[in-house]
Image (cartoon, rainbow, N blue to C red):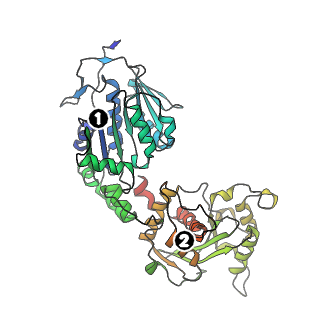
């Protein structure tokens, strides 16, 4: 069957962006695009994948007016032809799915919300998939694919995608931000950039390119530079890799500048940030005033429980000669403390016990409902370490200093915590700091998440 009545014009927004058009119309089978965040790579590839799906195996050209032409003069019935959008997770794949629906004319497709598929007028189907499980990507014949946020996609998933394109000789666009040098995307990008791979092409779009094209405002770039860790900023906005060769979690920690004597100032709120491991159970003491973060104490109790920890806190922060004052506290901490636990009396959750034992109001209970993703939290922690003054007491908060110095990231993007017997892998004090920062300094993620 041949579809004879079909009109399509490339969107005006796309046609005005030269850098975008260059990678969309690259005359090669494989394309690697390293681009600043929000530079138009996703929208460009949404349009590209759609154009692949309506053409005869990608045989088309777009004239100077943006009119799409099939080189065969026809649009084939393409029932059973599969086109993929692969992202690191289903959540990210769904973002692209929603953007497709918003950006493309509604009359040209039918969307299946539960399956994350788009069916086009000619029968072709676009699948929005997660690359989290490489085994789930084998088996199909795919005619074109986009790998989105590629530096966060596992290499095994890229290998699986490559095999699905083999029989069809399908094309693939690999797009994303730069994220270090120890990943498969960086290696392929360098090989494509230097012409080492046949039928591959490399493109780069920086923040300056996006500003010049009117896609981003310079004020947004400037704010990101003021807010993010410098290494993260250069990766996200200029494609310059940040090499954290030691795999340190807190790479922006500066012991010479941030370790200083400090003590509790009772004129300002005291943040209690809890971590609920039994051995040790831990609470970080933090304050935030005069544009500075203070950590006078890390409380670690071996083989203890939440009741003893609360009693310790009441005693420690009661001023001699004065009654206990619960109004000075704000509670943050591990979101798992919202769950009921058999480790405490009456199967209550930790935060209900803390509220009762410290005589707190509900307004003082300011823990988050879920813990942060480690990768995102690492960016946030280092942004705060770089841009906010700190005083971490060398005596009272020594366990936090130790963790900031020695905590490491594993290649899979998680914290190295495999051996609780190893002091550098317990990281309970670091966790209290992470929870405190995540609850109170989320604004420092704005340039990263946008």
- Few, some or many C-alpha atoms within 10 Å of disc 2 (few <14, some 14-19, many ≥20)? many
Cα separation, mark 2 vs mark 1, equals 47 Å
Residue 342 in the image: above or below residue 126 = below
Task: Identify which residue is drawn at 37% across, 37% down.
Answer: 146
| Callout 2: SS | helix
Compared across the picture, whether 368 is left or right of 96 comes to: right
- Few, some or many C-alpha atoms within 10 Å of disc 1 (few <14, some 14-19, many ≥20)? some
What x and y, as percent, mark residue 35? Answer: 31, 49
Quickly name the residue at label 2: 403
What x and y, as percent, mark residue 91? Answer: 50, 43
- Front in this rendered view, residue 433 or 185: 185
Task: Identify which residue is drawn at 34% across, 30% down.
Answer: 170
Compared across the picture, whether 201 is left or right of 424 comes to: left
What x and y, as percent, mark residue 168? Answer: 35, 27
Any part of residue 214 in sight: no
What x and y, as percent, mark residue 213? Answer: 24, 47
Quickly name the residue at label 1: 29
Return the residue found at the far left.
64
- Front in this rendered view, residue 18 or 150: 150
Task: Identify which residue is drawn at 58% across, 67% down.
Answer: 427
Image quadrant holding the N terminus, namely: top left
Sequence-wise, the earlier of marks 2 and 1 is: 1
Compared across the picture, whether 231 is left or right of 382 comes to: left
């Amino acid at each position: 069957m041949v579809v004879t009545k079909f009109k399509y014009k490339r969107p005006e927004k796309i046609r005005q962006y030269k850098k975008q058009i260059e990678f969309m119309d690259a005359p090669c089978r494989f394309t690697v695009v390293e681009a600043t965040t929000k530079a138009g790579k996703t929208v460009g590839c949404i349009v590209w994948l759609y154009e692949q799906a309506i053409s005869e195996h990608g045989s088309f050209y777009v004239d100077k007016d943006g009119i799409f032409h099939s080189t065969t003069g026809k649009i084939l019935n393409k029932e059973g032809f599969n086109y993929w959008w692969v992202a690191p997770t289903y959540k990210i794949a769904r973002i692209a799915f929603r953007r497709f629906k918003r950006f493309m004319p509604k009359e040209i497709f039918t969307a299946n919300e539960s399956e994350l598929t788009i069916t086009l007028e000619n029968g072709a189907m676009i699948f929005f998939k997660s690359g989290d499980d490489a085994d789930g990507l084998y088996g199909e014949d795919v005619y074109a694919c986009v790998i989105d946020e590629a530096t966060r996609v596992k290499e095994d998933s890229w290998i699986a995608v490559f095999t699905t394109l083999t029989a069809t000789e399908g094309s693939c666009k690999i797009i994303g931000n730069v994220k270090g040098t120890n990943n498969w995307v960086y290696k392929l990008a360098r090989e494509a950039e230097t012409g080492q791979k046949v039928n591959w092409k490399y493109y780069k779009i920086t923040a300056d390119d996006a500003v010049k094209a009117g896609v981003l405002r310079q004020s947004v770039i400037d704010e990101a530079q003021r807010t993010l860790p410098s290494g993260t900023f250069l990766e996200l906005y200029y494609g310059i890799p940040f090499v954290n060769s030691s795999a340190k979690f807190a790479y922006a920690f500066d012991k010479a500048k941030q370790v200083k004597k400090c003590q509790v100032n009772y004129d300002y709120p005291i943040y209690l940030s809890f971590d609920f491991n039994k051995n040790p159970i831990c609470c970080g003491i933090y304050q935030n005033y005069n544009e500075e973060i203070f950590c006078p104490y890390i409380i670690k109790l071996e083989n203890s429980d939440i009741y003893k920890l609360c009693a310790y806190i009441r005693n420690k922060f009661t001023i001699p000669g004065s009654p206990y004052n619960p109004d000075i506290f704000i509670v943050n901490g591990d979101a798992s403390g919202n769950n009921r636990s058999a480790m405490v009396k009456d199967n209550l959750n930790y935060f209900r016990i803390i509220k009762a034992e410290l005589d707190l109001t509900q307004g003082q209970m300011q823990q988050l409902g879920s813990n942060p993703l480690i990768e995102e939290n690492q960016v946030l922690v280092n942004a705060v370490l770089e841009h906010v003054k700190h005083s971490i007491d060398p005596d009272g908060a020594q366990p936090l200093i130790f963790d900031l110095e020695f905590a490491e990231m594993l290649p899979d993007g998680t914290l190295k915590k495999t051996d609780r017997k190893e002091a550098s892998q317990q990281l309970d004090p670091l966790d209290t700091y992470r929870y405190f920062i995540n609850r109170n300094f989320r604004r420092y993620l704005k340039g990263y998440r946008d």
